[in-house]
Amino acid sequence: MGLVRLVFICCFVFVYGENKHDGSIKHDDPMLNTETPNYKEYCVIGAGPGGLQIAYFLENAGRDYLVFEKDHMAGSFFQKYPIHRRLLSINKIFTGKTNKEFNMRHDWNSLISNDDSLKFGKYSKEFYPNADSLLEYLNDYATKLNLKVQYNSTMHDILKRKDGLFQMWDQHNNAYTCKYMIVATGVSEPIAPKFAGDHLIEGYENLSTNLSDYKGQSVFIFGRGNAANDVANFINGVTAVVHMLGRSPTRLA
Ligand SMILES: Cc1cc2nc3c(=O)[nH]c(=O)nc-3n(C[C@H](O)[C@H](O)[C@H](O)COP(=O)(O)OP(=O)(O)OC[C@H]3O[C@@H](n4cnc5c(N)ncnc54)[C@H](O)[C@@H]3O)c2cc1C
């Protein structure tokens, strides 16, 4: 490990593979049949907080929908991230107010629902909770509210057909057709900036979580978002100096 440890904090982009299909369908194509079980009026891809929240409203409105999740559980992002397992989103249980709207605005972790048992404060009392509590919460949210989530389904090649419907395939090449497509896949791929010395960079996703690796070191962090702050907070006590560089002012959630 060098004197200066460069930490690259991931910027993420959406990356979709190019569609292999051009959207053309034949008139006898079974995909035209909207009566099949593989037709849904609303398809939601991803069962993170975003996908679950929209599923809640679709469920309550009695819509024909299905959430497709590539992992075996909801909120899969939080299985690994933040890597130091301390959430950055505060769990403000005591606000001094009884107004539900006010309290919800100070609760950074709960999703909206009509079930009071699904308040995040019931899952953790810590101000900066462990990420495992959020994972548990999100999976309870999906189960208790009977949200329709199909797990282990990695969707690809999403396209809008010439008849206006959307089509996509899972990893087993089962095709699904939908009238409305909601993509809630969150973040995906890290972007590594190119510059002289970029071989010294370590990405957030591969960083050591062993504090002794940072003892007395000067650390330069590219980025000032969630990942950057997660690392800076963690290593601050043992490093000689931590520099953070962002292309824009810090924006809080
Ligand atoms: C380092 C870091 C730390 C963070 N810490 C916090 C924190 O402490 N508290 C907080 O509230 N927020 C935190 N955030 C922000 C939080 O992660 C996001 O705001 C939140 O996860 C966004 O939710 P989402 O549902 O849009 O996406 P995600 O949570 O990313 O969910 C997307 C889902 O889509 C699934 N998916 C992806 N592609 C496919 C596909 N092709 N087919 C099927 N499923 C697919 C994924 O498996 C995943 O479950 C942090 C972010 C980062 C980067």
Image (cartoon, rainbow, N blue to C red):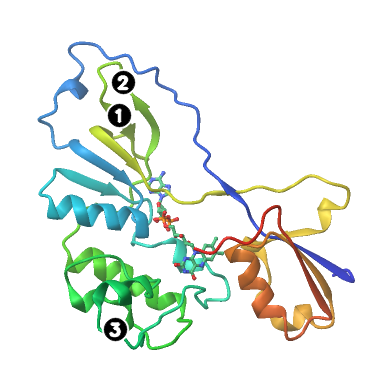
Q: Which callout, 3 or 2, points to the residue nearer the camera?
A: 3
Q: Residue at x 25, y 17 (%)?
A: 163
User: Which residue is at 17% across, 68% downward?
Assistant: 114
Give the total of numbered labels: 3
x and y, in percent, of residue 98 in the image: 25, 84
Do the residues bearing badges 2 and 1 touch, measured as CB atoms within 8 Å? Answer: yes
Give amino acid for label 1: Gln
Q: Distance between the residues labelled 3 and 2?
A: 45 Å
Q: What element carries label 1?
A: strand
Q: Who comes first in sequence, dot 2 or dot 1?
A: 2
- Residue at x 65%, y 79% (from the top left corner): 234
What is the quadrant of residue 27 in the picture?
A: top left
User: In front: 124, or 22?
Assistant: 124
Q: Earlier in the sequence, mark 3 or mark 2?
A: 3
Residue 24 in percent (x, y) is at 32, 14
Which label number is shown at residue 167? 1
Assign a secondary structure to mark 3: helix
Q: Which of 39 and 104 is in front in this view?
A: 104
Left-right relation of 1 to 43: right
Q: In which quarter of the image is residue 178?
A: top left
209 sits left or right of 78 in the view:
right
Q: How far apart are marks 3 and 1 (CA)?
A: 40 Å
The span from disc 2 to disc 1 (Cα, nearest Å) is 7 Å
Q: Name the residue under label 2.
A: 161
Q: Is mark 1 within 8 Å of ligand 1?
A: no
Q: What residue type is labelled 3?
A: Lys
SS category of the residue bearing label 2 = loop
- State the residue position of label 3: 122
